[in-house]
Image (tube, coloured by chain):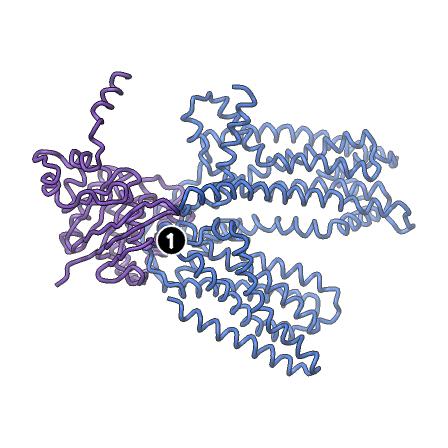
Chain colours: A purple, B blue
């Protein structure tokens, strides 16, 4: 039985003449939490946007549970997505926004409401339910986006820096939800800049630098790759993205200046 | 910091606010992440659009300024029945002051709402600027929003006044009057924008009463725009009628001179002709003018204080209400889209005006055609042509609503045909409302309804086809880009090229009648041809939409 949730083959993305991602290939299997790591502008968000159908790639193949992303409705139906930048319909209230999302996803009222009740209570959103999204704090907007992504119980969760803006409690709940989702057999693609979180949460990680994968595997596999048996994911990350060299000198120079 | 530096800094803040207001970034849309040049083009377009908006206001003020004084030039060789020159001048001056106020308020509303909702202090607060400097920058930025219309208002008014033979004293009074009118306009703009943002745009609420009040606010918000439009269209007639009524009922004048802008209208007129010997009127108008000048002074102080406060801390939106449950009612997708669109329209004036535009335009068209005693086929078709052209402007903007939060909603499993069907239904509903308005006007004017009912009903099929064609072309072109508002309007050629086929489809049945009328005088044959064309177009476009994935 094929357990592949996401198959990305030779994906290339460009903005005009600027090439953001080049020949990127990876697979994510069911039950995995796959971390996408990389410095700013490495191509993580562009890759994620292609997976969720927001961006059209220049070339390459992408399949979600065997469905090519060109079959937009079928592939998007299986995905729950939290974007990096939370741009929701600000003039709607969360209630109205969830009604819209669940209408488009053709959810049964009873199913939608029972799931919604649980998530709203978990993320303490009830008091803001009839307040326009425009008037919510960044953290609460993020919570609305997370709940909207979970509402239809998707097989694949794609989360682009979902912890940004969340308080400690919500952050913990989300991490538990992600783990639980993977244990249930679902797949998660998770992008973050917080290496400690990625190290603890992700089954496998892929490090992208300048649009190319420079390292992929479990943390142990990556340690072998950089020949550093004790190193943390942060150390590995800095090595494979070639950011470590000269960094100590830079820090020293900054210290002296201070 | 020097004034020059403050002025320069205010330009940067002003550009940001213009950008936000034009691209509705405050309501959650995202710019397409494309090349640098595309973003630069969008920023440039935002600046150009704001300038165009200011120039349109200026153009209206300039046109109106001279139109409103035209009745004066007709009185060079007056007939015995003509109203006296001083009364006409009073009407012209008063009408100009009132319209300048309306135009500045309603044309500047969108950008001032963006100003009120923006958190300028968040940007400026972190800079090494004193509170006083920040507040000065904010105030200068507010002035930049209205600079050209304000200056034009004064210049046009004085030019038009001296053109009809004004005096020096009258000119000075006219200058004071227009300045007061503009101060009141700024006061009204900022208070309306503040009220709108805190109570409507950012006001949630679930109850039917809250929804109803929101819709009422929105209508009140939009109607004066159309009012200003009608006033401009019929400026000369209004002044003429005003003069005739005032002359025949002199008692009205004693009350009017107490009311702004008539108090200044009378005073300017008196300073021009020194004609009246009724010193009570002079005393009343002078007294009330002083009171209005004092009120303008207070208004100016309030505006400066409020603008600075808004920039300093933003506007506080209404309190959150207690939420009893989290129950939601999912619908089938196209109903969900319609409901979402109506909800957005109830909070965003730009979209709400869309739904009212065809009905308002219908009233104007119906009034224009009211001079015809018989509502025959030609008049009916002429009116239907007008309504259909306005209705067909609706779908592109309606579709641009999908640009709000497109960076998120594009990840939803939405079918093109669902989207097209939902937007078509909304647009057709707007057409049907226009038709009902037309029928209502026909009943009031005691005209026959049968032709409007038959042809209007059948034409609905052709208009639906035109709408579906526009939406199909638009979804094909902008589906991947998320329908961002800027995408559609910044590509004017594409926009026009999409409107033209829609117009052709809607007009084809009307053209068929004109063609048939050359061959036969039979109304039955014309009606049959009209039906065949409209029905075929509707069936064809429905099939095309059904094939969209």
For this view, does A5 lie left or right of residue B422?
left
- Residue B421 position (above or below residue B268): below
Q: Is residue B66 visible?
A: yes
In percent of width and height, residue B321 lies at 38, 44
Q: Is residue A146 visible?
A: no
User: Does B130 sit above or below residue B70?
Assistant: above
Considering every residue shown, the one lying at the far front of the view is A17
Whether residue A25 sits left or right of residue B199 in the image: it is: left
Q: Is residue A256 left or right of residue B2?
A: left
What percent of the width, then of the height, locates residue B213? Answer: 50, 50
* Residue occupying the point 45% across, 45% down: B38
Work out which residue is located at the far left of the displayed protein and give it: A229
Is the C terminus of chain B in the top left, top right, bottom left or bottom right quadrant?
A: bottom left
Residue A66 at x, y percent in the picture: 22, 62
Query: Is residue B537 placed above or below A35 in the rendered structure?
Result: below
Q: Picture quarter containing residue A207?
A: top left
Q: Residue at x 41, y 49 (%)?
A: B205
The residue shown at (58%, 72%) is B459
Secondary-structure class at tag 1: helix
Label 1: chain letter: A
How far from the left and from the top, in percent, is residue A51? Answer: 28, 53
In this rendered view, identify the residue nearer to me: B220 or B492.
B492
Q: Nearer the viewer, residue B290 or B71?
A: B71
The residue at which mark 1 appears reads as A96
Q: Is residue B145 left or right of residue A187?
A: right
Picture quadrant of residue B392: bottom right
Camera-side residue of B273 and B30: B30
């Amino acid at each position: 039985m094929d357990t592949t949730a996401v198959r990305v083959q030779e994906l290339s993305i460009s903005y005009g003449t600027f090439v953001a991602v080049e020949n990127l290939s990876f697979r994510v299997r069911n039950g995995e939490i796959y971390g996408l790591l990389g410095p700013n502008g490495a191509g993580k968000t562009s890759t994620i946007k292609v997976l969720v159908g927001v961006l059209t790639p220049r070339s390459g193949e992408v399949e979600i549970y065997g469905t090519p992303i060109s079959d937009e409705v079928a592939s998007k139906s299986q995905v729950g997505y939290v974007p990096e930048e939370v741009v929701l319909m600000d003039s709607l209230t969360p209630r109205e926004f969830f009604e819209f999302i669940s209408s488009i996803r053709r959810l049964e009222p009873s199913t939608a409401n029972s799931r919604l009740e649980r998530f709203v209570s978990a993320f303490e959103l009830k008091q803001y339910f009839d307040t326009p999204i425009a008037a919510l704090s960044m953290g609460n907007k993020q919570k609305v986006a997370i709940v909207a992504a979970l509402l239809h119980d998707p097989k694949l969760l794609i989360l682009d820096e979902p912890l940004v803006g969340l308080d400690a409690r919500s952050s913990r709940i989300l991490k538990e939800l992600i783990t639980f989702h993977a244990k249930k057999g679902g797949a998660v693609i998770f992008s973050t800049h917080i290496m400690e979180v990625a190290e603890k949460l992700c089954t496998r990680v892929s490090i992208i630098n300048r649009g190319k994968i420079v390292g992929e595997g479990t943390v142990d596999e990556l340690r072998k790759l950089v020949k550093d048996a004790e190193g943390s994911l942060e150390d590995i990350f800095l090595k494979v993205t070639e950011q470590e060299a000269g960094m100590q000198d830079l820090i020293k120079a900054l210290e002296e200046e201070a | 910091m020097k004034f020059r530096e403050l002025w320069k800094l205010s330009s940067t803040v002003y550009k940001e606010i213009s950008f936000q207001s034009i691209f509705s970034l405050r309501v959650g849309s995202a710019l397409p992440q494309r090349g640098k040049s595309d973003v630069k083009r969008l920023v440039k377009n935002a600046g150009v659009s704001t300038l165009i908006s200011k120039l349109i206001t200026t153009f209206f003020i300039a046109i109106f300024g001279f139109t409103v004084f035209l009745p004066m030039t007709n009185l060079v060789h007056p007939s015995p029945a003509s109203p006296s020159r001083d009364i006409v001048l009073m009407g012209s001056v008063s009408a100009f002051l009132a319209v300048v106020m309306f135009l500045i308020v309603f044309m500047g509303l969108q950008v001032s709402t963006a100003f009120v909702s923006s958190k300028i202090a968040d940007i400026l607060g972190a800079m090494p600027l004193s509170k006083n400097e920040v507040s000065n920058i904010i105030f200068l930025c507010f002035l930049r929003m209205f600079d050209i219309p304000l200056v034009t208002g004064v210049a046009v008014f004085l030019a038009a006044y001296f053109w009809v033979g004004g005096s020096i004293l009258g000119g000075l009074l006219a200058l004071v009057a227009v300045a007061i009118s503009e101060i009141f306009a700024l006061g009204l703009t900022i208070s309306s924008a503040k009220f709108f943002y805190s109570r409507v745009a950012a006001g949630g609420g679930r109850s039917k009463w809250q929804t109803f009040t929101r819709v009422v606010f929105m209508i009140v918000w939009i109607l004066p725009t159309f009012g200003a439009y009608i006033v401009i269209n019929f400026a000369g007639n209004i002044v003429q009628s005003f003069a005739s009524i005032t002359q025949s009922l002199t008692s009205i004048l004693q009350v009017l001179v107490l009311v702004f802008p008539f108090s200044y209208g009378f005073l300017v007129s008196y300073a021009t002709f020194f004609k009246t010997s009724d010193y009570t009127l002079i005393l009343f108008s002078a007294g009330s003018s002083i009171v209005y000048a004092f009120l303008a002074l207070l208004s100016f102080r309030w505006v400066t204080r409020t603008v600075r406060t808004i920039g300093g801390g933003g506007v506080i939106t209404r309190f959150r209400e207690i939420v009893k449950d989290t129950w939601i009612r999912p619908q089938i997708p196209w109903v969900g889209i319609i409901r979402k669109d109506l909800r957005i329209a109830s909070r965003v004036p730009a979209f709400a005006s869309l739904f009212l535009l065809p009905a308002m335009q219908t009233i104007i068209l119906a009034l224009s055609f009211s001079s015809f005693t018989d509502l025959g086929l030609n008049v009916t078709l002429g009116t239907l042509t007008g309504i259909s052209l306005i209705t067909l402007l609706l779908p592109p903007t309606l579709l641009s609503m999908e640009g709000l939060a497109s960076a998120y909603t594009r990840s939803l499993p939405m079918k093109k045909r669902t989207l097209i069907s939902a937007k078509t239904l909304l647009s057709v509903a707007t057409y049907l409302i226009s038709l009902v308005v037309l029928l209502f006007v026909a009943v009031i004017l005691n005209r026959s309804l049968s032709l409007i009912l038959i042809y209007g009903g059948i034409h609905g099929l052709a208009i639906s086809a035109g709408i579906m064609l526009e939406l199909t072309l638009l979804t094909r072109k902008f589906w991947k880009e998320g329908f961002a508002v800027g995408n559609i309007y910044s590509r004017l050629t594409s926009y026009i090229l999409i409107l033209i086929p829609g117009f052709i489809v809607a007009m084809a049945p009307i053209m068929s009648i004109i063609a048939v009328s050359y061959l036969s005088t039979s109304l039955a044959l014309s009606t049959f041809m009209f039906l065949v064309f409209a029905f075929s177009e509707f069936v064809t476009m429905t099939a095309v939409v059904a094939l969209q994935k």
